[in-house]
Image (tube, rainbow, N blue to C red):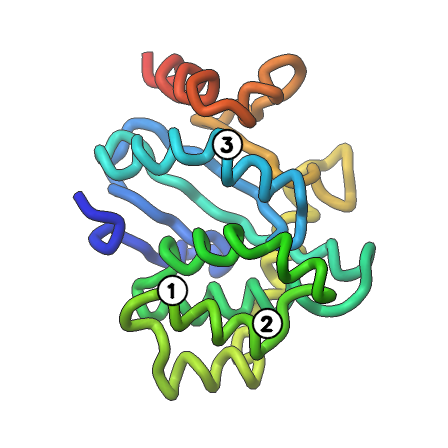
Amino acid sequence: MDVEELPEKLAADGTTIVVGDPAAATTVRLYEDLRCPVAEEFETTGAPALREMTLRREAKTEYTLASFRDDRVGGDGSKRAVNALRAALDADKFTEYHTILFENMAENERAGGYTTASLLKMASQVDGLRSKTFDSAVSKMTYKDFVTDSEKAYEAADGDAPRGPGTPTVVINGTQVTGDQYGWLFEKESFDQLLNSARK
């Protein structure tokens, strides 16, 4: 399966974006903020193991997209990025665009965070994503309610931490990765081992 062929859909709860074969044996719940440097580190280190499993139809990923970093560092870049990703889902380009955004996160942060202009520029790197509908959704924050609801879902994910569990948070088949194993998220072979052990 090619990445362009990965099934992508919005779950019934209205905030979870599901990528991968619905029948996959391993389900990974992933909480991310698009401006979080630790989430960026995960995406460039351990996450490729998850993508490979997803392409083999062995795993699916349930994304909850947070935007709390805006309040911490200023601006509205996280909110704009989440809105743009929701628009990309309508074009079946969520996975490709998600990858591009994280690949360019550091550069955007140095410039003050994602903007409408930078989000559209990056969207041009994804074949078939740019359109009048997509561009308008990015510019006008068409999915601002989704952005708000997704942040609320993130904040509600951990009853012991009312502001959310932190990003990235990874939950494999219902079990959150914590303690010493949390470091495994940032090394591809270790995370691959963790994902495969969950299948047994």
Residue plotted at (24% across, 55% down): 4
**Residues under labels 1 and 2: Cα distance?**
15 Å
Residue plotted at (67% across, 47% down): 36
Residue 145 tag number: 2
**Residues under labels 1 and 3: Cα distance?**
24 Å
Residue plotted at (47% across, 55% down): 13
The residue under label 2 is which amino acid type?
Answer: Asp
Dot 1: element = helix
Task: Report if the CB atoms under discs 2 and 3 are less than 8 Å apart.
Answer: no
Q: Nearer the viewer, residue 74 or 18?
A: 74
- The percent position of residue 22, horizontal first and vertical second, equals 27, 42
- The percent position of residue 165, horizontal first and vertical second, equals 69, 37
Q: Nearer the viewer, residue 107 or 25?
A: 107
Say few, some or many: other residues with alpha carbon within 10 Å of mark 3 (under 14 / 14 to 19 / 20 or more).
some
Dot 2: element = helix
The residue under label 3 is which amino acid type?
Answer: Thr
Within the image, what quadrant is residue 82 found in? bottom right
Rendered view: 109 above or below 179: below
Residue 89 tag number: 1
